[in-house]
Amino acid sequence: MDSNVPMYAAGGPHENKRPSLEFLRRVQVGELQAVTSTEVLQEILHRYHRLGRPDIAERVYDLVVQLCAEVLPVTIADLDACVHLLGEVDGAVRDALHVAVMRNNDLETIATYDAGFDAFGVQRYSLG
């Protein structure tokens, strides 16, 4: 799961809020299983602290940790794979890192609204 899903769920009115809440509900009741990475948690903390909202940072962080079956570490092997991916695909560094973590953990699908993952050939979970 990418950081934008719980962030839309926690945010104000937006077209992605309801689908995000529904996805997280399905994870909570066991219809879906979600994993994430330490990089996603860092992105959540970074964004909300930059906005001066450490209270929201902590709540969203705790929600993600509670809901996800596993929080994958980012390893040197993931960073090496990220470097390799960036040599092949003109994409965002953060997206490449997420893709590297996914591939190194045999994950094929990401719950995200970020179309940047398409450049890496990653399947996006349909949220809406």
Image (cartoon, rainbow, N blue to C red):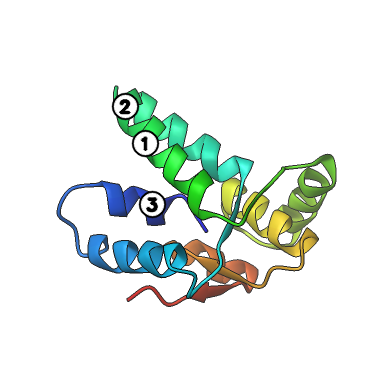
Residues at marks 3 and 1 touching, judged by CB atoms closer than 8 Å: no
Residue at far front of view: 29
Q: Which residue is mark 3?
A: 6
As helix, strand or loop, the secondary structure at mark 2 comes to: helix
Q: Which residue is mark 2?
A: 55
Disc 1: CA contacts within 10 A as few (<14), some (14-19) or many (>=20):
few
Q: Secondary structure at mark 3?
A: helix
Q: Nearer the viewer, mark 3 or mark 1?
A: 1
Can you give x and y, in whole percent of width and height, for residue 20 in the image? 33, 63
Residue at 50%, 62% in the rendered image: 116
Write down the quadrant of residue 46 in the picture: top left
Answer above or below: position of 126 versus 60: below
- The answer to whether residue 15 is left or right of residue 61 is left
Q: Disc 1 marks which residue?
A: 59
The CA distance from mark 1 to mark 2 is 6 Å
Q: Are marks 1 and 2 in contact (CB under 8 Å)?
A: yes
Residue 49 in the image, given as x and y percentages of width and height: 38, 25
Q: Is residue 38 shown left or right of residue 10?
A: right
Which of the two discs, 3 and 2, labels the residue nearer the N terminus? 3
Task: Please tell me which residue lies in front, 78 or 20.
Answer: 20
Q: Give 11 or 78, whichever is nearer the viewer.
A: 11
Residue type at mark 1?
Arg
Measured in 3D between alpha carbons, the distance from the residue under mark 3 to the one under mark 2, in whole angstroms, is: 15 Å
Residue at left offset 41%, top offset 70%: 26
- Label drawn at residue 27: none
Horizontal and vertical percent position of residue 14: 19, 58
Image quadrant occupied by the C terminus:
bottom left
Report the side of 12 relative to 43 (left or right).
left
Name the image quarter holding residue 113: bottom left
Residue at the image position 62 percent from the left and 59 percent from the top: 90
